[in-house]
Image: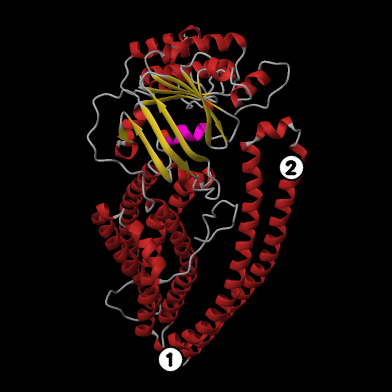
Amino acid sequence: MAKTRGLPLDPSEKRKLNKQNFQKLAGIFRFALPYRSPFLLGMGFLFFSSLMLLTFPYVAGKLIDAASGEAWIVEGINSIALILLGILFIQSLFSFFRVWLFAQVSERSMRDIRMALYDRMVHLPMSFFDKRRTGELISRITSDVALLQDTFSITLAELLRQVITLLAGIVFLFYTTPRLTLFMLATIPVLVIIAMVFGRFIRKLSKETQDELAAANVVVEETLHSIATVKSFTGEEFESRRYGRGLNNVVKVALKAAGYRGAFISFIIFALFGGIVAVIWYGANLVGAGLMSVGDLVSFVLYTTFIGGSIAGLGDIYGQVQKAIGSSERVMEILDESPEPVSVAQRSSSVAGEIVFSDVHFQYPTRPDVWVLKGVDLFIRSGEKVALAGYSGAGKSTIVQLLMKFYEWQKGSISVDGKPLNEWDLKELRSNIGIVPQEVLLFGGSIRENIAYAKPSANEQEIVDAARKANAWQFIEKFPEGLDTLVGERGVKLSGGQRQRIAIARAILKDPAILVLDEATSSLDAESEALVQEALDKLMKNRTTIVIAHRLATIRKVDRIYMLKEGQIVEEGDHETLANVEGGYYAKLVKLQFSEATLPPLG
């Protein structure tokens, strides 16, 4: 799929109209199949509505003829005027039902597309999200689907209406005024060719404008995502100048496009009205020669107006269909992605928590040239507490990600309770692993919702008990709204210690067999750290626990420590054993961290 490297996808990006791209658009239409009855009924109303409207110019012409004394099948100006009003009334009814029926199809189809898209996204593997930006994925489910909704509710209806108006209008004209029709049609090819040449050039400039605007919007996205960094480095003026330069480029290209667009529009107006003057002049000569009536000339002018509007409308619809194909391609790209595999194995009644890594080699899909793990072997007994120590990039977090089966490893084997990880049902496996991260990101709802996320069926007492065990109830009960207190986006209304205790309460409610602690106290003050550590001690009882160590002071009590360096386990043992190994890696870290020297963070 074509896109500018590093830029978010442009929802207005167009595609050529060919068989292959129409097949992509057809893939979206399967979501409308459950609603084909109202869709076909709406199409019927649209067809008859268009035909009813096309009778209006013909009857209007007969009204003029009646005023001139010419006879028709209905006599009298008043009778013909009532027929015109009847035509408009019936056409209005048809239009109402057409809009209502298409709205039902489009709203329900788009709901199904958004649901399918979101459901597929959350079931995709982590490697998918590593390769894409969050803003790009949000654009798929918002801008792209909104454009498809316009296609379902407006563009398709307009396309059919304009085609019917164009074809039926020309038939009516050939039937009523064949000479004048041939004269008019002779002028159309010249205008169409000029319009196509100008239009292609203007679209190119419009695409350049969109590219420049997308580049400028990247500045906004990066700034807002890293606003704390921008402010801490007093980069506000720098970012404003950077955004200003981007907007200046947008204006420069847009004004150039506006100049050509203005010249094109001026030419079209001149040519269009010049053509109308020529047609009316020729028609007036035919009226003067007695070859047609004044009413026929009026009908011809009205039909010509309808046909001209249809031709202009088809140009816009052509662009809308191109955009819809681009949107359908981006939506189908996600829907065609393979979700995480779900094993058909029988679910275990209980999980003991024994973990074995055997000669595991791993590379991230986004970094296939770097081995993150190189032959890792580790054994964790059920209920054992183990720490993974080492500097940033050593592979500690990667081991946990593989245990959660976020990625597929390239070599070796991993098992839980003696069963290979590939044979585990993903939902069952992950439901038995609880994580308390270093940086807790809560959902923007209430404290109750955040704790109950681990067990949506939990009752009030279970949530309160989990909060008490996590030492969180002491601050929750002080809030006026208690458990219903809103935590704000990403939990910003709570302190770091409070967020950590909410995360611990969530893990307690989940009651996992395997617990992962990603140095949950490293960024807390002394009082909060003591409360969180007390809650963690309760949580770790009788559970297999993996502690990702950033500070060695927090891992003295574990049963065994695995020391990692550059993706390999270089030492293992308890704290006392490893600390006394002369020249050992762990011993060096202990001396550095517990001396006056400053050690770079272990990460």
- The image quadrant where one finds the C terminus is top right
Q: Position of residue 338 (x, y in %)?
A: 36, 50
Nearer to us of marks 1 and 2 is 2
Res. 173 image quadrant: bottom left
- Using the rendered view, name the quadrant where residue 424 is placed: top left
Which secondary structure is most common in the magenta stretch? helix
- Asked whether the viewer can see residue 495, the reply is no
Q: Nearer the viewer, residue 520 or 147?
A: 520
- Between disc 1 and disc 2, whose residue precedes? 2
Toward the viewer: 265 or 155?
Answer: 155
Measure how far apart labels 1 and 2 are at the Cα level. 72 Å
Mark 2 element type: helix
Dot label at residue 290: 1
Q: What's drawn in magenta, residue-wise?
A: 396-402
Query: Residue at position x 75%, y 33% from top?
Result: 233
Q: Are marks 1 and 2 in contact (CB under 8 Å)?
A: no
The disc at residue 92 is none
- Residue 561 in percent (x, y) is at 50, 22
Residue toward you, 356 or 75: 356
Which type of secondary structure does the marked residue at label 1 adopt?
loop
Query: To which residue does mark 2 refer?
Result: 240
Relative to 335, say whether 52 is above or below. Answer: below
Mark 2, other Cα within 10 Å: few <14 / some 14–19 / many ≥20: some
- Image quadrant in which you'd find residue 306: bottom left
Q: Residues within 10 Å of mark 1 (few under 14, many from 20)?
A: few
Residue 248 is situated, as x and y percent measured from the top left of the image, at 73, 54
Residue at 63% over, 65% down: 205
Query: Which residue type carries mark 2?
Result: Ser
Is 38 in the magenta? Answer: no
